[in-house]
Amino acid sequence: MYMQYKLEKPVISTIGTTKYQCNVEWRNGNFIVDEPESIGGKDSGPDPYTLLLSSLVSCKIVTLRMYIDKKGWNISSIVGKANLFQTQTKENLVTTIDCDISFPDSIISIDQKEKLLMVAEQCPVSKIIGGSTKIRSFIYLEDDLENEKTYSNQEVAVVWKGELCKHSARCITQLPKVFNLKSQPWINVSGADAQTIRKQVSKCPTGALAIKK
């Protein structure tokens, strides 16, 4: 079984010396994440808790919209509100997230209400937060970025930074004619056309693989 990331490119967050402003890059642009003034930020963007809640409640109402449209129900507007609180037990910190969903412009039956609640609870982000989630963190130093090898032919050159290669290798499974740990060298740039190799390399989430320009 190999790893398949949900996003083609990772979300990138960068912070400088301005407290506590982060610039977040996603596939179609960027936005600011900040902390409230009460803890030293400038409140110039949503804080991490707000982003977490926004992700959850937005996923719920989008999932509901898809279901409602599929059913053909006359429900024009969906409003979701989310907040959280935390309690400390002897064993650990328990977080409770409450999501309130309403349909202000529509009248729904009891049966519809029960079904919509079930659908909302099964949205993808709910499954991530409420399921079995593993968080892996890696620290990369400048020396890691300097340890690299280049594999090339006349059409394409692939740069491999071995110290960054800490994840399950999707490249080995998806393009084995090029990436094969049992071969020497393990990257064979003649195993596929240049366009296919570039496409596969672009999927590398850590930067371990790159195309040399």
Image (tube, rainbow, N blue to C red):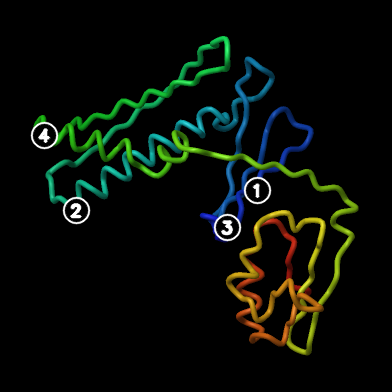
Q: How many marks?
A: 4
Residue 33 image-quadrant placement: top right
Give the CA separation, mark 4 to mark 3: 39 Å
Query: What residue did someone put label 2 on?
Result: 70
Q: Nearer the viewer, mark 3 or mark 2?
A: 3
Instruction: Give the percent coordinates (x, y) of residue 73.
Output: 13, 46
Instruction: Give the percent coordinates (x, y) of residue 77.
Output: 23, 38
Classify mark 1: helix, strand or loop: strand
Query: What residue did someone put label 4 on?
Result: 111
Q: Nearer the viewer, mark 4 or mark 2?
A: 4
74 over 94 or under it: above or below: below
Q: Residue furthest front?
A: 182
Q: Which mark is residue 12?
A: 1
Q: Residue at x 72, y 27 (%)?
A: 19
Query: What residue did someone put label 3 on?
Result: 3
Classify mark 2: helix, strand or loop: helix
Most foreground residue, 196 or 76: 196
The quadrant of the rendering that contains the C terminus is bottom right
Classify mark 3: helix, strand or loop: loop
Whichever of callouts 4 and 2 sits on the residue coming sooner in the sequence is 2
Judged left or right of residue 100, residue 4 is right
Instruction: Give the percent coordinates (x, y) of residue 204.
Output: 66, 62
Q: Nearer the viewer, mark 2 or mark 1?
A: 2
Query: Which amino acid is tagged 2?
Result: Lys
Give the CA separation, mark 4 to mark 2: 17 Å
Q: Nearer the viewer, mark 1 or mark 3?
A: 3
Whichever of callouts 3 and 2 sits on the residue coming sooner in the sequence is 3
Give the CA separation, mark 4 to mark 1: 43 Å
Whichever of callouts 4 and 1 sits on the residue coming sooner in the sequence is 1
